[in-house]
Amino acid sequence: MKDNEKARQIYGNPTVFKKCRADKKFAYVVALARAVNALNSAHSLMMSTTGEDAPAAIRDRMNSYFFVSGILYEALKLIRAMNTVFAGDKSFEGSLRLILKDASGQALEQMHLKSVRHGGVFHFLPDRFAEAIATTPMTECVFASTFGEQKGNIHYTFADLITAEIGVGTRLDDNVVVTQMMEKTLELVKQFVDHSENFIGDQLHGWGFRVLPVALRPAVELPHSSQNQA
């Protein structure tokens, strides 16, 4: 971390936390924060492999997009669930609610995000893959690509291409459709993250959370398995 970067926490003291636990809205804000974490992590996988053409890098970029699409589909469902709970909330109406009114986002959700989410991200259904395989315009099958002998470097290319066709709903060489789909998806992700961060900040401020500087310390990690311990 650079010297001019300061570690901060958005902190709620015991009184604030007690108030939040008694408010049914708090769970929705926590769920929204989890969705933002998932989207940011999935998108970072794409950015970290930009310009690389090794099989593993191509695999990671493709799957980053698949994960982003599936998570975004679920995130939109969360916003709909928040409609009633946050009805009349000016912050919600002026941010996240606007996403649901966007006709372009609605079309993207139904035409592409839903197919990727159900077909190749959170469900791995052979019947769905069989349908896509039966209609693919591909005339040959490069099933996998790899570089070197290290485990985990392999990219099962054909499986990802079939998943991409499921999401696109047409031929992958239809550059106009593919480009528009990807651009609209990433723009929707940006809108969702921006609106979510503003909305979460407004809610936390209302509950009494404060932004405090903190001393640098190691990030919280899950315990290591006994196999990794000396």
Image (cartoon, grey):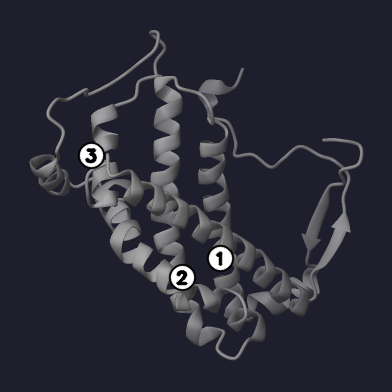
Q: SS at mark 3?
A: helix
**Contact, CB < 8 Å: mark 1 with mark 3?**
no
Residue at the far front in the pictured view: 176
Residue topped by disc 2: 78
**Contact, CB < 8 Å: mark 1 with mark 2?**
yes
From what the image shows, is residue 14 above or below residue 189?
A: below
Q: Amino acid at mark 1?
A: Leu
Disc 1/disc 3 C-alpha distance (Å): 31 Å
Disc 1/disc 2 C-alpha distance (Å): 7 Å
From what the image shows, is residue 201 above or below residue 81?
A: above
Q: Residue at x 66, y 72 (%)?
A: 199
Q: Earlier in the sequence, mark 2 or mark 3?
A: 2
Relative horizontal placement of residue 227, taking residue 221 as reference (left or right): left
Q: SS at mark 1?
A: helix
Q: Residue at x 50, y 72 (%)?
A: 99
Residue at the far right in the pictured view: 3
Residue topped by disc 3: 162
Q: Amino acid at mark 3?
A: Ile
Mark carried by residue 229: none
